[in-house]
Image (cartoon, rainbow, N blue to C red):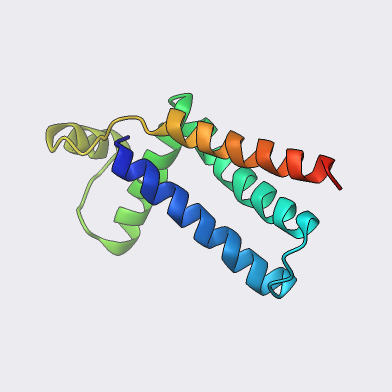
């Protein structure tokens, strides 16, 4: 994952935290609310990042295969044909799991540190 991708991820997760702050806490910026928002965003990012970092990408291949079958983008008979197509077109990207995992752990640690001050 490039530096630009990391910055985009951090900005997107901070926007998600602000949206949580708006919809759940009505922009009440107390320490516990900030800690809660950062923890939820970090936790929601942690589990997909863990799946990606461990290399269990077959789960996402299965989901994208089913969606391609539902919306008839391509007609693949089996998931193996779909994976071969992705390999030929070089659609597999580098594994962004480790930076995402680090970002999510940073959010969780920051939320725990903020919560310890309360």
* Residue 103 located left or right of residue 86: right
Q: Is residue 56 visible?
A: no
Q: Quadrant of the N terminus?
A: top left
Which one is in front, 72 or 24? Answer: 24
- Residue 36: horizontal and vertical position, in percent? 73, 53
Q: Is residue 17 visible?
A: yes
- Residue 61: horizontal and vertical position, in percent? 36, 40
Which one is in front, 28 or 60? Answer: 28
* Residue 62 located left or right of residue 23: left
Instruction: Tell me which residue sits at (64%, 44%) in the image.
Output: 43
- Residue 2: horizontal and vertical position, in percent? 29, 36
- Residue 77: horizontal and vertical position, in percent? 25, 44
Quadrant assignment, res 32? bottom right
Q: Residue furthest right?
A: 118
Instruction: Tell me which residue sits at (67%, 36%) in the image.
Output: 109
Q: Residue furthest left?
A: 88
Instruction: Tell me which residue sits at (19%, 31%) in the image.
Output: 87
Q: Residue furthest front?
A: 117
Instruction: Tell me which residue sits at (25%, 35%) in the image.
Output: 92
* Residue 16 located left or right of residue 53: right
């Amino acid at each position: 994952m490039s530096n630009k991708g990391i910055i985009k991820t951090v900005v997107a997760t901070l926007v998600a935290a602000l949206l949580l702050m708006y919809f759940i806490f009505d922009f009440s910026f107390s320490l516990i609310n900030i800690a809660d928002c950062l923890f939820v965003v970090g936790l929601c990012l942690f589990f997909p990042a863990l799946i990606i970092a461990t290399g269990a990408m077959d789960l996402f291949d299965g989901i994208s295969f089913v969606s391609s079958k539902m919306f008839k983008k391509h007609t693949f008979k089996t998931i193996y044909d779909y994976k071969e197509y992705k390999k030929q077109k070089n659609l597999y990207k580098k594994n962004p799991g480790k930076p995402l995992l680090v970002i999510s752990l940073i959010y969780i640690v920051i939320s725990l540190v903020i919560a310890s001050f309360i």
